[in-house]
Amino acid sequence: MAESFILTVSGLQEERAFEAELQVYGYSHRIVVFIENEAITFEPDEEGNYRAVFKEEGKKLNIDKALLQAIATQLEKDLK
């Protein structure tokens, strides 16, 4: 079951808001964040930090790495 919410990310040049979805499965979860019409999945690693996971090999995304890091950092702040 997915639960939608708005993720507000600060730490960039400007504050931005993204549509996001919490997806719980088993004993874990992932968060799908919609960036520029792309669904980017963030999952917690063994230490509880979030990382972007790309499932499609070879697909070129034009998304700034600093933005992905800012989203991961915001998720860690909000969900711990």
Image (spheres, rainbow, N blue to C red):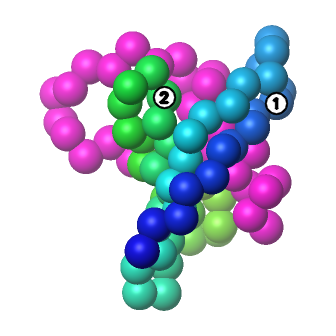
Q: Secondary structure at mark 2?
A: strand
Q: Is residue 78 left or right of residue 57?
A: right
- Give left or right: position of 3 versus 7: left
Q: Quadrant of the C terminus?
A: bottom right
* Residue at x-position 65% and y-position 58%: 49
Name the residue type under label 1: Ser
> Disc 2 marks which amino acid?
Ile
Of residue 26 and residue 53, the one placed in the foreground of this image is 26
Indicate the quadrant containing the N terminus: top left, top right, bottom left or bottom right: bottom left
In the image, residue 42 above or below residue 8: below
Spot occupied by residue 71 in the image (x, y as percentages of width and height): 65, 38
Which residue is painted at 45% across and 21% down in the image? 36
Q: Is residue 5 above or below residue 28?
A: above
Q: Is residue 7 visible?
A: yes
Dot 2, how many residues are within 10 Å of its Cα: few (below 14), some (14-19), or many (20+)? Answer: some
Q: Is residue 70 magenta?
A: yes
Point out the tag, 1 or 2, that comes first from the N-terminus: 1
Query: Can you tell which mark lies on residue 19?
Result: none
Under tag 1, what secondary structure? loop
Q: Relative to 30, say whether 18 is above or below.
A: above
Q: Which residues are magenta?
A: 51-80
Residue 21 in the image, given as x and y percentages of width and height: 51, 55
Q: Is residue 51 visible?
A: no
Nearer to me, 46 or 74 = 74
Q: CA distance from mark 1 to mark 2?
A: 15 Å
Which residue is rendered at x = 65% and y = 67% of the image?
A: 48
The image shows residue 53 at horizontal and vertical percentages of: 39, 47
Task: Name the residue tied to disc 2.
Answer: 35
Q: Which residue is mark 1?
A: 10
